[in-house]
Image (tube, helix red, strand yellow):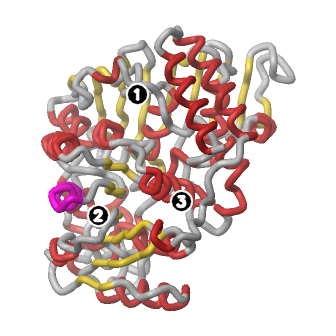
């Protein structure tokens, strides 16, 4: 049955070479639905020799979530963890002890302990969940050590050159670098992907998304609690407040674009028949973080004197070679409920997640009136979620963390490229330095680099075409 699945996918890919765009959208939608009836491979391996030997660098709040998911799987052997923070290591070891799994080797002591970990010869893959500035050197270090599967938390670099270096290293070592962008697997996001591929929205015209999340209690704490209870950051902060807030002090741009742009890129086949052409960003004034410090810590607190460079709302416009426009917003320093602000609009209708609504011309209940999106999302639930929803129960972020780790592990087991590759990682993540450049140049439009070297014209969509991973 596994061979049958592979044969069907091969036939699909071959047919793509002679299809026009409209035929592709229709066919991939049908294929995705058709494959749901085929039983896929087992999630949990019974053969001990088939286990993926994996190491995790960075076991703070995010890394520990990945460790938890790895411990649930019978096809994974967690052989090493690394962190410089004793509290993070203690919490992670307690988690491992409760799982009744073997305690992995622990690497700690200094900021270069990860290099010693990478010297272990039996590591099949590594997951990196450290502060952003460490992602590039750790990815490249892992590649240079011979590891061919690297899963990195967002983002993959700080400067544009960082992104090129990651791409070139992955190409040099013929390795897989997957950015673990979990929102690509959010249930409503994937249902809309299913709708897009079946042509319900028509030809896509305009898309919106972003990171709209009040992070003030993430960027500041008391040095003890993970969230809030104070206005300390940097050396006096704990967890993300220890490192993330410094980026708000020194940088001004869309510092966290991938939650919004990842799903959007999959909707319009970026790097696979389409690509970003240029970008222009604007930044508002910065008031939110200063006001929070004054309100919570008083106007005489030393941090009240800090000048934060990051504008409270950063807006980025991107145009694509196939004619679509994209609007992204980064909004993390003001009081607001969480929303990624998705909008997917085509010639036949649109989805907007803020008002949880969908409208499809001549198919919605009433003309010029919204339908409850859930009616459509249930009908077009993605095959992945239909198959794996029970296994995803209890996983972080509403279950979508299960899917991103599942895709990474299954790619390793089957020795196939990861569904999100190094070109996706670099393209999505590079929005940060490009937006910084645009703002610094007085909101000038800047050209978007082509990390694929022209191969975007020939590469075919591979993300979640069926129900395997």
Residue 346 screen position, x and y as percent: 59, 18
- Residue 227 tag number: none
Answer whether residue 142 is magenta in the image: yes
Q: Secondary structure at mark 2?
A: helix
Q: Nearer the viewer, residue 414 or 94?
A: 414
For the residues carrying marks 1 and 2, which lies nearer the camera in this image?
1
| In this view, 371 is above or below 348 | below
The CA span between labels 1 and 2 is: 29 Å
| Residue pointed to by mark 2 | 244
Q: Residue at x 56, y 24 (%)?
A: 12
Q: How many numbered circles are shown?
A: 3
Bounds of the magenta segment: 135-146
Could you tell me which residue is drawn at 50 percent across and 9 percent down?
18
Q: Is residue 229 left or right of residue 252?
A: right
Give yes or no for contact between labels 1 and 2 (Cβ–Cβ under 8 Å). Answer: no
First in sequence: mark 2 vs mark 3: 2
Which secondary structure dominates the residues rendered in magenta?
helix
Quick check: marks 1 and 3 in contact, CB under 8 Å?
no
Marked residue nearer the N-terminal end (1 or 3) = 1
| Residue position marked by numbered label 3 in the rendering | 401
Quarter of the image with the N terminus is top right
């Amino acid at each position: 049955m596994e061979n049958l699945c592979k044969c069907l996918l091969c036939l699909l890919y071959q047919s793509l070479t002679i299809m026009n765009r409209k035929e592709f959208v229709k066919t991939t939608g049908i294929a995705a639905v058709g494959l749901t009836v085929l039983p896929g491979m087992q999630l949990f391996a019974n053969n001990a020799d088939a286990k993926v030997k994996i190491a995790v660098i960075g076991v703070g709040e995010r890394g520990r979530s990945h460790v938890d998911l790895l411990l649930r799987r019978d096809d994974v052997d967690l052989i090493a963890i690394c962190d410089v923070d004793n509290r993070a290591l203690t919490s992670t070891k307690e988690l491992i002890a409760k799982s009744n799994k073997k305690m992995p080797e622990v690497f700690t002591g200094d900021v270069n302990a990860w290099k010693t970990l990478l010297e272990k010869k039996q590591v099949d893959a590594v997951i990196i969940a450290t502060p952003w500035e460490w992602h590039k050197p750790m990815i490249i270090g892992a590649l240079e050590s011979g590891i061919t599967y690297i899963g990195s938390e967002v983002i993959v670099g700080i400067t544009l050159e960082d992104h090129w270096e990651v791409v070139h290293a992955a190409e040099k070592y013929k390795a897989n670098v997957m950015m673990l962008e979990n929102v690509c697997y959010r249930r409503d996001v994937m249902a809309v992907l299913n709708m897009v591929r079946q042509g319900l929205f028509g030809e896509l015209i305009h898309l919106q998304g972003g990171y709209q999340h009040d992070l003030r209690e993430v960027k500041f704490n008391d040095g003890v609690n993970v969230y809030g209870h104070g206005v300390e950051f940097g050396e006096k902060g704990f967890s993300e407040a220890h490192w993330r807030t410094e980026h708000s002090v020194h940088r001004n741009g869309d510092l966290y674009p991938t939650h919004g742009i990842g799903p959007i890129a999959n909707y319009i086949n970026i790097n696979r028949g389409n690509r970003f052409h240029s970008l222009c960003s604007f930044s508002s004034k910065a008031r939110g973080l200063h006001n929070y410090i004054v309100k919570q810590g008083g106007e005489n607190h030393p941090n009240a004197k800090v000048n934060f460079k990051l504008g409270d709302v950063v807006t980025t416009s991107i145009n694509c070679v196939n004619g679509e426009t994209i609007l992204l917003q980064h909004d993390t320093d003001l009081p607001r409920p969480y929303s990624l602000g998705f909008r997917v609009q085509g010639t036949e209708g649109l989805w907007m997640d803020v008002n949880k609504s969908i409208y499809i011309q001549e198919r919605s209940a009433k003309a010029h009136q919204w339908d409850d999106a859930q009616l459509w999302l249930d009908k077009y639930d993605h095959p992945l979620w239909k198959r794996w929803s029970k296994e995803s129960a209890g996983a972080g972020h509403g279950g979508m963390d299960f899917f991103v780790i599942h895709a990474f592990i299954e790619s390793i087991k089957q020795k196939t490229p990861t569904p999100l590759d190094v070109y996706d990682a670099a393209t999505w993540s590079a929005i940060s330095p490009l937006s910084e450049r645009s703002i610094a140049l007085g909101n000038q439009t800047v050209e978007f680099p082509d990390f694929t070297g022209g191969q975007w014209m020939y590469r075919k969509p591979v993300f979640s075409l069926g129900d395997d991973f």
